[in-house]
Amino acid sequence: MNASARRVAVLGGIRIPFARQNGPYARASNQDMLTATLEALVSRFSLEDETLGEVAAGGVLKHSRDFSLTREAVLGTRLNPHTPAYDLQQACGTGLEAAILVANKIALGQIHSGIAGGFDTTSDAPIAINEDLRGVLLELKRAKSNAARLKALAKVRPQQILPELPRNAEPRTGLSMGEHAAIMAKEWGIERGEQDELTVRSHKNLAAAYDSGFLDDLVAPFLGLERDQNLRPDTSVEKLARLKPVFGGQQGTMTAGNSTPLSDGASAVLLASEEWAAAHDLPVQAYLVDAQTAAVDHVHKREGLLMAPTYAVPPLLARNGLGLADFDFYELHEAFASQVLCTLKAWEDPVYCRERLGLEGPLGEIDVDKLNTHGGSLAAGHPFGATGGRIVASLAKTLKENGSGRGLISICAAGGLGVTAIMEAAA
Amino acid sequence: MSDRYQQLVNTPIGKIVSKQIGLPNPVKLERYERGQPLVSGPVLFGAAPGGRLAGATAKVLAAIDADVRTPLEKGIRTAAADAGLDAKVFDPDAATEDETFKALVFDASGIEVSEQLREMWAFFAPSIRRVRNSGRVIVLGTAPADCKRPRQATAQRALEGFVRSVGKEIRQGATAQLIYVGTNAESQLSSTLRFYLSPKSAYVSGQVVRVGASALSADGIDWELPLGGKYALVTGASRGIGRAIAKVLARDGAHVIGLDVPGLQRELEETIGELGGSSLVLDITDDDAPARIATHLLDDHGGVDVVVHNAGITRDKTLGRMDEDRWNMVLGVNLTAQERINEELLSREVIRENGRIVCVSSMSGVAGNAGQANYATSKAGVIGMVESMAASLATRGLTINAVAPGFIETQMTAAMPIAIREAGRRMNSLAQGGLPVDVAETIAWFASPASGGVNGNVVRVCGQSLIGA
């Protein structure tokens, strides 16, 4: 870390409840959701007419017209219009990467405050025109004579009416995220039972977080939804055991229950320097201490697509002089229960730690009682870009309530990416 | 020499018919070819908790670049990591049926009481049906004689019954072996584990071999040419098994000195000439044969590294009809000549340090055989020679071992009456006869400079024959 870097305070965050695909948010756009979320944050922290250093946010499934969606959303809020903004995208790591970018600028003194956000809708998904038809239309546009225009139009075919739908598939493997996770689950011998147990724990923890009021100031109702639509407080291992596998074939262990559903939602987090926080009379909940991204080679070496966080965490720990056990809370994004279990097993495995991570021995074990203590993506749902903000806000509050301690965030992402970060309670 | 039955049951129709009426279904065994990997598929590697051989085993698996899977257990994963073995994980409960293995290797040395034999079941029951054609099951343990406590010795002795049963169950050309590794002999495991993992041990099954400590290290050996720069004497080298032995030792880098009787001089010179070796023509039962052999080896080669006592004859008759000549000839060639040659070579220090004596016994020597009282006596005597000389040779840095071939397809067996021939071929776990090369590969393993810890063993090359088992 830069010795002259300033500490970055997390002042708090907010999100709208996450909805399942084609649920209550079916007609809401990304911009609608982000604007509502930013507005909720403005209300909570009294940011009306405030000019912030920047707002950085992003999502995975975007329309091409939304090239500057975050700036447009900012203009739709009560933030001062002089607040700059930009969009970014790093698959499921988008939300946490946004927080890292804003935090780094604060640490360097380039800005004093900022909002990191994320959003995604799988309902209001972009549908592109047929690739063949697009070619014809572009040719038509280039044509300079009527004859050439006619010639181009003559290439229109009935099958070109079929549109291009967004696919949840890895570009270089053609496999869906779930199919990749199923390969990993098989490689690590992850059993159905342990996945279902992790899923139940996620639901129970999230339900308890709602019931205890923990989420009262972290979730702002939207379009009539007050809690995450995917949450099943009464789920059980027995109920989950009845579900049929959806990934990994008939002998697969991954079901709709122990995999995250496609969902819609948005989140935002307020970050600032300590001076800015003090000047605005806003208490510091936690500090964003350090972050690390990494990537696996899922193409040539056929590494597990969602294993990149296993690579990111060891250098992050080493740089901060920490061991894996030196945390009070672990926020591992539950893309799939099997992904979390693969990650835990990999860090405990001498072979993986030596051969893949270049460590002398196992990185260590994680006490599951400290894992995703207020629920995870399996229960809440996972609007890709919004998950990072959900986790940062939840962990900041957890650390504040705990009064001390340290938390580790780990998020896997498409493209073989992993984004991780360390947060510490405000002393 | 061709096995027409095996060819027939491996035709599409033959497969159906033999399966329907329950006939033996011998598969074509995979055999070693230069340059191919020792193991042609994934190896599942496990261990009972507290064992001492996982580290040495992992090192061998890493050295041969094996594609290894292990259960996700700390002990075995640590051993794998320490050996630099990039092992994947295997969990039978999560694995699909198409996950199969070329070899299962299990370190059972941690088993100290009979209750812990359950580990054998736990590892093999979910994996045994995943063994591929010509696959390998290898169990590693501690020889009962090396165990400190009676219960430990009991449990380790029990492994023999397990391995022999597995050998009889697995079919499809797969084999099962037990390797007892002595105290401080972990570093000597390599040559034996490589041999048993590889197609070189195609016709060896249900065997128990002991690997002991040795002052001589296998480090730095060229595994492609283990006998490079070595001289190997092979008696009876002109034909059959002897010819195969000469070829395999030459393949492994040895200069072969082929020996045979004057009547076979032309065949001998043809065989040995192809291998770039040298010939020695004499009758080993002649009074001056041992001295002539010793002198020849010293004068032409400065000594010898490997001596293979392969020359042998049969003169079958039931005992009551056997004349004295038949008795004397067989005992003379098959046993006494070997003893006399050994004595001469050892007393004149013709055999160099880290040298090897390898004898050829026989299934008849183990089990006895009607009409072969002379032959079986000589071949059982060979076993006695190995067992009695091993300890004293060890002190000189030498080893002595024997192979005991079962039914090997040679001109001799081709001349048998069909009923006896078919019985001999089928009455073993692999349901077929072996080839001369199978005996030769086993001898090459004994002969390897890396096999210093392999001493006093008699290994049968019989496809786990029912006879004498």
Image (cartoon, coloured by chain):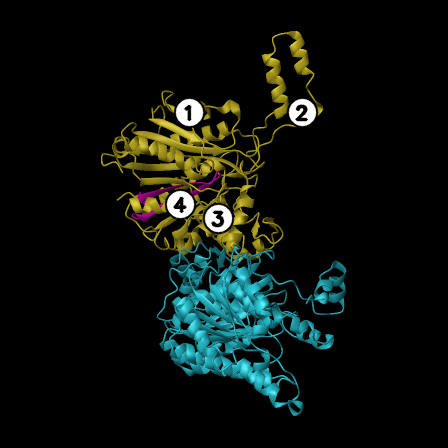
Chain colours: A yellow, B cyan
Q: Are marks 4 and 3 in contact (CB under 8 Å)?
A: no
> Residue at the bottom extreme?
B320
Q: Nearer the viewer, mark 3 or mark 1?
A: 3
> Residue at the top extreme?
A145
Q: Considering depth in this image, is A229 or B53 the residue closer to the camera?
A: B53
Q: Which residues are magenta?
A: A399-424
Identify whether B57 is placed above or below B469: above
Image position, residue B27 (x, y; %) = 66, 63
| SS state under label 1 | helix
Identify whether B139 is placed above or below A47: below
Identify whether A94 is placed above or below B67: above
Q: Is residue B377 visible?
A: yes
Q: Amino acid at mark 1?
A: Val
User: Mark 4 — on which chain does it sit?
Assistant: A
What is the quadrant of the C terminus of chain B in the image? bottom right
Mark 4 and mark 3 lie on one chain; the one further toward the N terminus is 4
Instruction: Determine crowd level at label 4: few under 14, some 14-19, many 20+ residues with C-alpha closer than 10 A.
Output: many
Alpha carbons under labels 2 and 4: distance apart: 44 Å
Residue A160 shows which numbered tag? 2
Q: Amino acid at mark 4?
A: Tyr
Mark 3 and mark 1 lie on one chain; the one further toward the N terminus is 1
Main secondary structure found in the magenta portion:
strand
For residue B398, what is the image quadrant?
Answer: bottom left
Q: Can you identify the residue that label 1 sits on?
A: A74
Mark 2 and mark 1 lie on one chain; the one further toward the N terminus is 1
User: Mark 1 — on which chain does it sit?
Assistant: A
Q: Can you identify the residue that label 4 sits on?
A: A311
Q: In percent of the image, x 38 and y 30: which residue is there?
A: A42
Q: Amino acid at mark 2?
A: Gln
Q: Can you identify the residue that label 3 sits on?
A: A339
Q: Nearer the viewer, mark 4 or mark 3?
A: 4
Does the magenta segment cover residue B345?
A: no
